[in-house]
Amino acid sequence: MKADIFFFISSVATVLLAVLVSIVLFYFIKAGRNLYLISEKLQENFEESKEFVLELKERLEDNIVFRMFFPPARQKKQKEEKKNKK
């Protein structure tokens, strides 16, 4: 009789544990899918933002006030001279 009670309780506990694990896995899979979709959207928009940042950088480098506070580096001039020689 005691063995029957033990097996009944352990069976119920196993079923409850399996249900809880299933629910947790379901939410992990759902969260993972959402993160994947978000990363896909970010990758699509990355090229547009990259172009915007490069354009903004060029505008800042051409700005007189920006050049006053951040003078161009010598390395940049040397690279340009090498490109012009070739």
Image (cartoon, helix red, strand yellow):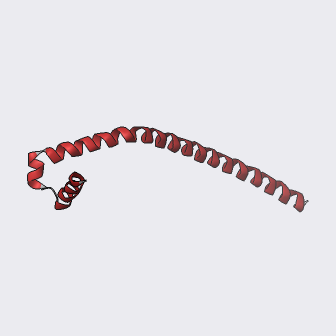
Residue at coordinates 60% horizontally, 45% vertically from top-left? 29
20 lies left or right of 59: right
Pick the quarter of the image with the N terminus: bottom right
44 lies left or right of 60: right
* Marker count (numbered): 0
Foreground pick, 12 / 69: 69
Residue at coordinates 85% horizontally, 57% vertically from top-left? 7
Residue 75 sits above or below residue 53 on the image: below
Foreground pick, 37 / 64: 64
49 lies left or right of 79: right
Residue 25 x, y percent position in the rendering: 64, 48
Residue 32 x, y percent position in the rendering: 55, 46
Residue at coordinates 9% horizontally, 48% vertically from top-left? 65
Question: Looking at this rendering, what residue extends furthest in the right direction?
Answer: 1
Residue 52 sits above or below residue 7 on the image: above
Question: Looking at this rendering, what residue extends furthest in the front direction?
Answer: 86
Residue 64 x, y percent position in the rendering: 9, 46
Residue at coordinates 8% horizontally, 53% vertically from top-left? 68
